[in-house]
């Protein structure tokens, strides 16, 4: 019992982990709500951006569980509006990003986000493999991972006709360097 209490005291708090990952001191948030008021994705979120900041401040096990399993982390479009509007100059978008990575690493992502997760992984794999975004490779990987072969298929002919989708992938000359970055992140435990 005493050992558990000592371990809990040593474990980094959620706020500390976020600070370490992003440099953002969430304790400075005074809950004005300006981030939420400007967020274009708020209607799709189950926790508003200011509530995310508050839960990081609380940082206990219940708050962490709620945060890492929420849909908000996967609805955030990374548009940075919250960051630009914050009167305390807190980078709420970076906090979202760090929490999303934590949820991913700890396998806490809600099963409801299965397709978003499949897209996230397909995107990263495509960038790692080609050194840049390649739409056809992304769609192929996403469809295989999500087993969603039907939705949006009707759009494909028009996209091919307009050159928006190409069978031949685009690979950058510097993809080996990009692959080294991915390998270094993996070694550090970031991915
Ligand atoms: S705008 Fe900044 S200070 Fe206001 S609630 Fe959002 S993060 Fe906190
Ligand atoms: S970065 Fe995310 S949380 Fe911030 S305003 Fe954009 S969609 Fe909303």
Image (tube, rainbow, N blue to C red):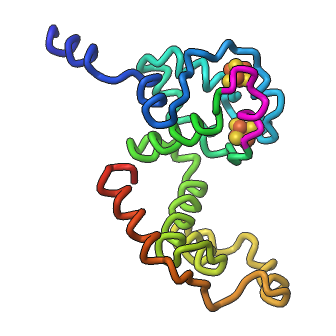
The front one of 54 and 93 is 93
The front one of 88 and 77 is 88
* The quarter of the displayed image where residue 73 is located: top right
Q: Position of residue 54 (x, y in %)?
A: 60, 18
Residue drawn at x 39%, y 49% is 190
Residue drawn at x 73%, y 83% is 165
Total tally of numbered discs in the picture: 0
Up/down of 156 relative to 63, above or below: below
Q: Position of residue 107 (x, y in %)?
A: 41, 45
Q: Position of residue 13 (x, y in %)?
A: 39, 21
Quadrant of the frame with the C terminus: bottom left
In magenta, the rendered stretch is 80-89
* Residue at the far top in the pictured view: 2
Quadrant of the frame with the N terminus: top left
Is residue 86 shown in magenta? yes
Up/down of 60 relative to 75, above or below: above
Horizontal relation, residue 34 to residue 1: left or right? right
Is residue 156 shown in magenta? no
Residue drawn at x 29%, y 22% is 11
């Amino acid at each position: 019992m005493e050992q558990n209490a000592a371990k809990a005291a040593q474990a980094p708090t959620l706020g500390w982990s976020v600070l370490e990952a992003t440099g953002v001191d969430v304790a400075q948030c005074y809950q004005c709500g300006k981030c939420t008021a400007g967020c274009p994705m708020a209607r799709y979120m189950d926790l508003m951006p200011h509530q995310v900041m508050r839960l990081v401040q609380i940082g206990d096990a219940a708050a962490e569980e709620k945060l890492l399993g929420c849909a908000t982390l996967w609805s955030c479009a990374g548009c940075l509006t919250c960051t630009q509007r914050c009167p305390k100059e807190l980078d709420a978008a970076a906090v979202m990003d760090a929490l999303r990575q934590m949820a991913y690493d700890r396998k806490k992502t809600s099963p409801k986000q299965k397709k978003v997760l499949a897209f996230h992984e397909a995107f990263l794999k495509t960038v790692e493999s080609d050194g840049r975004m390649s739409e056809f490779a992304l769609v192929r990987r996403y469809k295989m991972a999500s087993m969603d072969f039907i939705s949006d298929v009707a759009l494909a002919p028009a996209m091919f006709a307009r050159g928006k989708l190409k069978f031949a992938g685009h690979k950058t000359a510097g993809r080996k360097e990009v692959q080294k970055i991915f390998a270094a992140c993996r070694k550090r435990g970031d991915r």
